Structures are given as C-alpha cells and as structure tokens.
Amino acid sequence: MTAQTSRYKLTYPTGSDLVSGAPAQFKSMADSVEKALGEVDDRQTANAVKPVVRSTLAQLVEASAVTGQTGYVTGDGGNNGTYIWSGSAWVKLAVASDVSAMTAWQEYTFKMQSDVSFPGLSYGGANRLLYNAALRLIRVDLTPFRSTVDVGRYQVYLPSKGTIKPSKSMSIGQAILDDGTIGRELTLNTDGTVSVGPEIKNGNIIRPMPNLIPVPSGVTITVSGGTSI
C-alpha cells in the first residue's frame, strides 16, 4: 500500500497491490483514518488547532507554531492574553476590552550607566521609552549627555523603573552630535539596555533624537514594571 491522500495522509490500495495482502492493506487504511481522526479530535499536533499555552511570553516565544495558530499567556502580568502566530512572531490579539488600550502608553525610565563617564546634560528632559503594546510602537525620549571617555558601542542607558526587552536587538533611531551631524545609532538590546555606537569619543555631546519606532514584525516585546501614563 504505497498511496496516501495529500492532507491527512490516509493510505489506500493501488492497482499493484495483491489481493492476498488485502487484510493488511485494510488494517493499514483503518489505522491511518484513526490517526487522522485523533489529530483532529484530540488537537495533538501543531497542524491541528490546539492552542499553545505558556505561563510567560518568553516561553511562548520559544514555542513552535504554524501560521494562524492561537497562543495564550496566562501568568505574565501585562503580557497575559491571546496571541496569533503570524508566521514570524507571536502577535497579541486585541479584544473588546483592549480597545481603550489603543491610546494607552507605558513608561519605562532609564539611568546613565555612569554619571562620571556619561553625565546627562542639565535640564536634559526625560530619560525614558514609552511603549504602546496595542499599536506596537516605541516612543524614544532619552536624555542627552556629554561623554568623558573614548569607547566603542556602549550600553549607556540602563533600566531604572520597569524594563522593556525585545526578543531581538532593534534599532530605535539615531542621535545627533553638537556639530549638527547624525553620527550615533541607538539600539534597544535584549537585556533592556540602550546602546550608543558605533563609537563614543571624549567630549562628544550626544543628543538622542525623539522618535516613534514601530516594532518589527519579527520582534516580540516583553515588559515589566512600567508606569501607565
């Protein structure tokens, strides 16, 4: 018995099969039907419709899925809810109770890695990232600073209140130098820090540009301890 149906792989005899093998052939056919019914009824395969349930978003990110499959996060605070696998990332599904969240932002504040090496400018304003989970947008509002050291790409900004962590490091815009050139890149790292690079020179005054950054489709954001604003 060499032939199979395309979807559920049900086996069936072909013209080359011998009559003497009929009992074994029909048993194999029955077994294949039972297996297919089990997959549908028990929802035991990724190709069926069993939802992927995990306690945290980080665990869900590691789970395998097929496009359109449902996932649930059950014990991770603001990350709890229903997700859909887009083919490249888990995307949180907005429900009726989330409609008001479309305008809701969470604030995550930062401190300088060193007030000696990277002192913030007086009256430099806020030092934060804002995140809207429903819109998948990050607002960049980081304080400018003066460097007193020469370093390569460096984690200048450290989480202070709350954390926002991407599943992959992502660009969150650029910084402008005091001579008017755009000369530094800002990167939100997977540990929640923000790097400035590719280099920082002693005497540089670096001013991160306010920006509104869409989260890439292949990136999942994990948050904790943010403040609603």
Image (cartoon, rainbow, N blue to C red):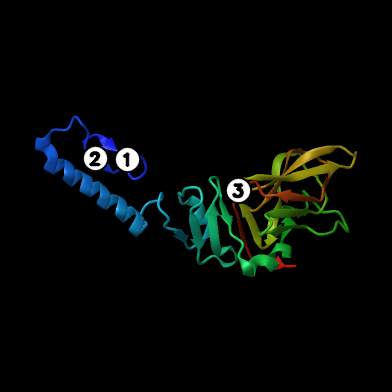
Which residue is disc 2 drawn over?
A: 12
Side of 74 relative to 29 (left or right): right
Question: Is residue 105 visible in this depiction of the protein?
Answer: no
Side of 122 relative to 92 (left or right): right
Question: Is disc 2 surrounded by few (<14), some (14 to 19) or many (20+) residues within 10 Å?
Answer: some
Residue 110 position within the rendered picture, expressed as x and y whole percent measured from the top left? 72, 58
The one of 62 and 67 positioned closer to us in this rendering: 67
Return the residue found at the far bottom.
97
Q: Amino acid at mark 1?
A: Thr
Q: Secondary structure at mark 3?
A: loop
Q: Which mark is residue 219?
A: 3
> Which comes sooner in the sequence, label 2 or label 3?
2
Q: Which mark is residue 5?
A: 1
Question: Is residue 194 visible in this depiction of the protein?
Answer: yes
State whether residue 17 is above or below residue 192.
above
Side of 49 relative to 189 (left or right): left
Q: Amino acid at mark 2?
A: Tyr
Residue 86 position within the rendered picture, expressed as x and y whole percent measured from the top left? 55, 49
Looking at the figure, which quarter contains the N terminus? top left
The image quadrant that residue 171 belongs to is top right
Side of 190 relative to 178 (left or right): left
